[in-house]
Amino acid sequence: MRATVMKSRVRARANIALIKYWGKANPDLNTPAVGSISITLEGLWSETEVEFDLRFTSDTLVLDGDSRPEQLGRVSRCLDLLRERAGVKTHARVISDNNFPTGAGLASSASGFAALSAAAADALQLDLSPRELSIVARRGSGSAARSVFGGYVEMHAGGAADGRDSFAEPLLAADAWPLEVVIAITDRGEKAVGSRAGMERSASSSPYYSAWIATSDSDLRAGRDAILEHDFDALAEIAEHSCLKMHAVAMANRPPLVYWNPATLDCMQAVKALRATGLPVFFTVDAGPQLKAICEPSVRDAVVGALRELPGVADVIVSGLGPGVEIL
Ligand code: PMV
């Protein structure tokens, strides 16, 4: 007999894709149309507490101190998967805090849903493997499947009808190649078009979507090889290509979807200029206007200095690579 109150608190970190995920194979199961490769960030995290209590009459969510009923559907869907496995119907109170801006293209859904899945599974005393946890987290947000793990992570698109082979797994440990990430915040607001809507629109209207899918396997291979060989230049080339190709697909949506602002472009130029002088640094940009510069630790301060001095950059966050989900 389980206790009436079951509670757990988990820290999960944001991740940034170097080989991007864009597009869904099965929107209901939230399986991705392409695989992806990411790095998990030490310094950007969600801490999520999940408490199941027989006295609760519905699930509730408080995110960064505010009640967020519009996000509750996705949260409850994740919780339902775990409740089903545990054979309970108990409602949960979810309290989650991010130590970075929410919904601004900094992968708050990745860290949030990874933390939620791990905390709920732990509270329900389910003994899930990291792979099973990755599959559950995927149902909340595709990129969350990757935040279960630390360091360099590969997400497999999979092909099974039930999504069982659509999970992430570790590629290389964080300390095996300790790169650093410098995030230039160019806008603190929440993005207007979320990744889910943007992806759906790409699949239905972007003429470049089929080319994106067709070239994904070779990008993944190049990214994986560059990481396993610690080949910075090769990783820089394929990561910038994957990023710009993803944005080109979205820009060709109807109606178009442009996530960048002028400062995003200024940051790209600054990174390019630094690399032209021989500094090991490259950029990537997700579904928002922030630019992420990835570099060798020895040049981190030079990268921070160059980005901080751009007029459109409001703030700079620096992070190394970090671990997967941690039960607190
Ligand atoms: O997991 P979602 O639905 O937030 O989508 C993430 C999409 C990108 O951040 C743009 C790319 C990626 O692979 O993380």
Image (cartoon, rainbow, N blue to C red):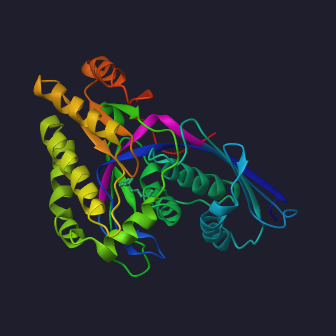
Q: Quadrant of residue 256?
A: bottom left
The percent coordinates of residue 45 (x first, y second) are 53, 39
- Number of numbered markers: 0
Is residue 39 located in the magenta-colored stretch of the structure?
Answer: yes
Quadrant location of ligand 1? bottom left
The residue sitting at 49% across, 36% down in the picture is: 44
Looking at the image, residue 6 sits to the left or right of residue 117; the answer is right
The front one of 112 and 151 is 112
Camera-side residue of 118 and 203: 203
Quadrant location of the C terminus?
top right
Front residue of this view, candidates 328 and 18 = 18
* Rendering coords of residue 248 (x, y %): 24, 58
Report the predominant secondary structure element of the magenta stretch. Answer: strand
Residue lying at 82% horizontally and 65% vertically, measured from the top left:
1
- Give the x, y percent position of residue 85: 63, 71
- Residue 164 magenta: no
Left or right: where 142 falls relative to 239: right
Residue 32 in view, yes or no: no
Q: Position of residue 218 (x, y in %)?
A: 14, 60
Above or below for 217 versus 96: below
Q: Nearer the viewer, residue 135 or 193?
A: 193
Q: Is residue 299 above or below residue 50?
A: above
> Which range is magenta?
35-46
214 left or right, relative to 204:
left
